[in-house]
Amino acid sequence: MPDRLLMLGTGTLKPGPGRYGAGVLLEVRGRRLLLDCGPSVVQKLYNAGIDATELDAIFLSHFHVDHTSDLPDLISSLAADARGYPRRPENPVKLIGPPGLVRFLGALLESNPFYSYVAEWNRMLRLVEPVEVDEGSEVRLGELVLRFAPVDHPNGFAVRVDAGNISVIYSGDTAPTPSVVRLAAGSDFLVHECTFPSERLMGQHTSEQGLAEVASRSSPRTLVVTHLSPAWTGREHEIVDAVRASFRGRVVVARDMLEIPLT
């Protein structure tokens, strides 16, 4: 298994050319970690030759629909092997998320009569194990060490994954915030959102100007730009130009299914 980032979903709620939903697969040190589970992520995993049962953990940065809509499908698919036959997992997949994760999972499955069968399968087969984290929490997956920081977005958290000499930070959705700068300081890869151009910036999100500030202050070796709205179509070069004014590292503007080696 190569150490890589596979950018499964690099857009927002509204599909744009080559980008839809939110989801990143991190493969490192023999582990597979899914960062967010937005629309079409399960199908994109399949297209990449990866069955959901091969995941070690799932991290939800927050609970908005474009980051979680495929979660019921993914959990239910854990009850069957790659051929569709029933299976009882040896160990549950860790479902890691901010405070409120257990309540969110209950509302999504247990309290929803139309999805309650997935909740029943989860209880019977132990498909996922919810792990709520907060600032200062640490989760270990083999050689991987996960640390977390709150961000400027409802219920939002970023994650830093250290695996030997490789460090990867995923911002989730956020406005520019010192917590991400601190978490990403001197890292190898910072995967950060850039939802809107500055003249259309709405809500707790990041524009190219805010992204340039975060990149210059945290100085990752590679900046991977994701979560782009369709407003960026044909204008992606403006992100690179804005960031390059103060940042000397590599800049990658992601599209769905882009593979980025962790080298």
Image (tube, helix red, strand yellow):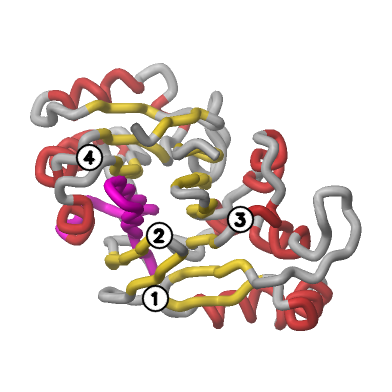
Q: Residue at x 74, y 62 (%)?
A: 78
- The image position of residue 126, as x and y in percent, is 71, 77
Q: Is residue 263 above or below residue 122?
A: above
Q: Is residue 88 above or below residue 6?
A: below
- The image position of residue 218, as x and y in percent, is 14, 46
| Mark 3 or mark 2: whose residue is earlier in sequence | 3
* Distance CA(mark 4)–CA(mark 3): 30 Å
What type is the residue that disc 2 sits on? Glu
Q: Is residue 188 left or right of residue 261?
A: left
Q: Residues within 10 Å of mark 4 (few under 14, many from 20)?
A: many
* Distance CA(mark 2)–CA(mark 4): 30 Å
Q: Which residue is mark 2?
A: 143
**Regarding mark 2 in the picture, which secondary structure is present there?**
loop
Numbered disc in front, either 3 or 2: 2
Question: Mark 4 touching mark 1, by CB under 8 A?
Answer: no
Q: Residue at x 34, y 32 (%)?
A: 263
* Distance CA(mark 1)–CA(mark 3): 19 Å
* Distance CA(mark 3)–CA(mark 2): 15 Å
Residue 133 circle label: 1
Residue 55 circle label: 3
| Mark 4 or mark 3: whose residue is earlier in sequence | 3
| Mark 4 or mark 1: whose residue is earlier in sequence | 1
Q: Which residue is mark 4?
A: 211
Question: Mark 1 touching mark 3, by CB under 8 A?
Answer: no
Q: Residue at x 71, y 71 (%)?
A: 90
> Which span of residues is magenta-colored?
155-178
